[in-house]
Image: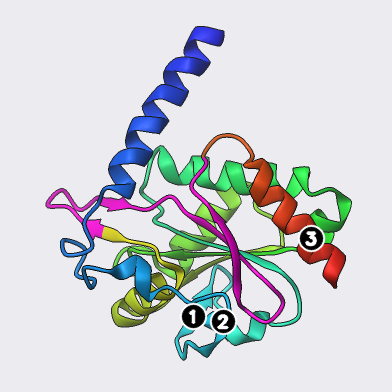
Amino acid sequence: MKLGHLTRRGALALIAAACVATTAEGAGLPATAAATAATATDSIYQAKATLADQDGKTFRLADLRGAPTLVSMFYTSCKMVCPMLFETIGLTLDAGGEAARKRIKVVAVTIDPDRDSVAVLRKTANAHGLDARWRLARTDRDSTRAVAALLGIQYRKLASGEFNHSSTIVLLDADGRIVAHTNTLGETDPAFVDALRKQLAAQ
């Protein structure tokens, strides 16, 4: 079991490294995409994108205002990194305690809106047993790029139709400001969990 775990972790480390190494130029983003992410004093709730979740309900990021939120990006046909991303978010919520499980919202925006319809998002949410705290969301291509830029997330579509992408989880405060981020997969990031707890305590 331990050997299998290490092998899986090693594979994930290589995949995560490859994802982080994805070039912004190849992704169609500015060369300094990370630098375009919202700063500590900016709110990503400035984004005008209209999204639709797995229940077909439309919303804007600003509608999340009022509670800390975890945000990430994924695509439903991703077989390894994205399921691990969901698992890591779940582990993080568990590590944050009862307050985190009750109060933290989760939004995951697909980077593949052409294939990830509302119905596909719903099927994915059900397959992963995601509860009402989670919103798997889609928007148009341009808005997807805009959200990614605000979060400092890079992605690039490959000839195969798959994607290279950052495996980043972002913590927003109640006003949509980025207060922490992590690229850890398969386990909790202690510093990130600590930042989450501090946000809950500040409410």
Q: Could you tell me how far apart the alpha carbons at marks 2 and 3 are, in whole angstroms?
A: 22 Å
- Toward the left, the furthest residue is 159
In magenta stretch: residue 58 = no
Q: Amino acid at mark 3?
A: Lys
What SS does tag 3 mark?
helix
Dot 3, how many residues are within 10 Å of its Cα: few (below 14), some (14-19), or many (20+)? few
- As for residue 159 lying within the magenta part, the answer is yes
**Residue to which mark 1 is pinned:** 51
Residue that badge 2 annotates: 61
Q: Is residue 9 above or below residue 122?
A: above
Disc marking residue 198: 3
Q: Residues within 10 Å of mark 1 (few under 14, many from 20)?
A: some
The image's mark for residue 82 is: none
The residue mark sitting in front, 3 or 1, is 3
Per the rendered image, the range of residues in magenta is 156-184
Mark 2 or mark 1: name the one nearer the start of the chain: 1
Name the amino acid, label 2: Leu
Which badge, 2 or 3, comes first in the chain's sequence? 2
- Out of 167 and 179, give the one closest to the viewer: 179
Q: Secondary structure at mark 1?
A: strand
Q: Earlier in the sequence, mark 3 or mark 1?
A: 1
> What kind of element bears circle 2?
helix
Disc 2 vs disc 1: Cβ atoms closer than 8 Å? Answer: yes
Residue 132, quarter of the rendered image:
bottom right
Question: Can residue 103 be seen by looking at this rendering?
Answer: no
Q: Nearer the viewer, residue 195 or 26?
A: 195
**Does residue 157 appear in the picture of this structure?**
yes
**Residue 68 appears at what percent x and percent y?**
72, 69
Say above or below: 160 vs 65. Answer: above
Horizontal and vertical percent for residue 27? 21, 63
Amino acid type, label 1:
Leu
